């Protein structure tokens, strides 16, 4: 079996997913929801914070149905044109994240191997930049796409309202912010286990 030539597991949008006004509205809602410290889960459900330092809140779809609609349209198109996974659906509330100076998120995957810990499988992750790229320095998204040394050097730069969609099983990270404040929206799309 030969993979189709159109298949790709890392897609950076060439046009905005959200308008500046929609980005502002997600920021407003995210800042008004209860904020918590971003953590990661290790074996046996132990929370760790040495791998991540950021502030997050959750934005349920019911709080912003009109804002979720363009994202839904994008994931359908991106999946059909690039990933080719079974039909995708939003499986969790969107995560609003703020990275201030010194904040980071080390190498990690958004999906797990043990499917009993994640009955609805994360297949596609989205990182969307809500803030203006001029508002911060550092805070680069890096994705491991097969060559770790290239991933270490990569600096995925996106404009406000643009997004990167990537397979949730790919290692990725956010490098430390060196100045300002980086605001982003992260969502996961998935469904039944891979076949």
Image (cartoon, grey):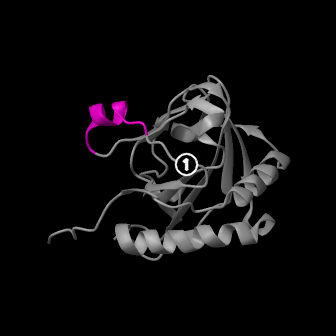
- At x 69% / y 56%, what residue is drawn? 20
Query: Is residue 53 among what the camera can see?
Result: no
- At x 44% / y 68%, what residue is drawn? 78
> In the image, 53: left or right of 121?
right
- The quadrant where residue 41 appears: top right
Above or below, 110 relative to 175: below
Indicate the secondary structure of the residue bearing disc 1. loop
> In the image, 6: left or right of 13?
left
Q: Name the spot of residue 6 as percent of width and height, x first.
A: 27, 68
Of 89 and 158, nearer the camera is 158
Q: Name the spot of residue 134 as percent of width and height, x first.
A: 62, 36
Above or below, 138 relative to 93: above
Mark 1 closeness class: few <14, some 14–19, many ≥20 residues within 10 Å: some
Region of the chain picked out in magenta, as a range: 146-155
Residue at far left of view? 1
Name the residue that disc number 1 marks: 159
- The quadrant where residue 99 appears: top right
The verdict on residue 108 being magenta is no
- At x 64% / y 43%, what residue is drawn? 132
Q: Name the spot of residue 37 as percent of width and height, x first.
A: 71, 35
Q: Name the spot of residue 32 as percent of width and height, x first.
A: 85, 48
Which quadrant: the N terminus? Answer: bottom left
> In the image, 137: left or right of 32?
left
């Amino acid at each position: 079996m030969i993979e189709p030539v159109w298949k790709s597991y890392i897609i950076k949008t060439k046009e905005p997913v959200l308008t500046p006004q929609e980005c502002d509205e997600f920021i407003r809602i995210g800042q008004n929801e209860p904020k918590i410290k971003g953590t990661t889960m290790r074996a046996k459900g132990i929370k760790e914070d040495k791998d991540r330092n950021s502030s997050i809140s959750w934005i349920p779809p019911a709080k912003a149905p009109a804002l979720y609609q363009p994202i839904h349209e994008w994931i359908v198109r991106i999946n059909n044109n690039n990933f080719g996974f079974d039909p995708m659906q939003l499986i969790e509330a969107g995560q609003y994240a703020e990275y201030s100076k010194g904040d980071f998120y080390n190498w990690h995957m958004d999906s797990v191997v043990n499917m009993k810990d994640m009955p609805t499988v994360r297949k596609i992750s989205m990182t969307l930049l809500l803030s203006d790229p001029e508002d911060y320095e550092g805070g680069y998204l890096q994705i491991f796409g097969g060559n770790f040394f290239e991933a270490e050097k990569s600096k995925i730069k996106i404009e406000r309202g643009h997004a990167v969609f990537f397979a949730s099983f790919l290692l990725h990270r956010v490098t430390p912010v060196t100045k300002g404040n980086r605001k982003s929206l992260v969502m996961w799309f998935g469904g039944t286990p891979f076949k």
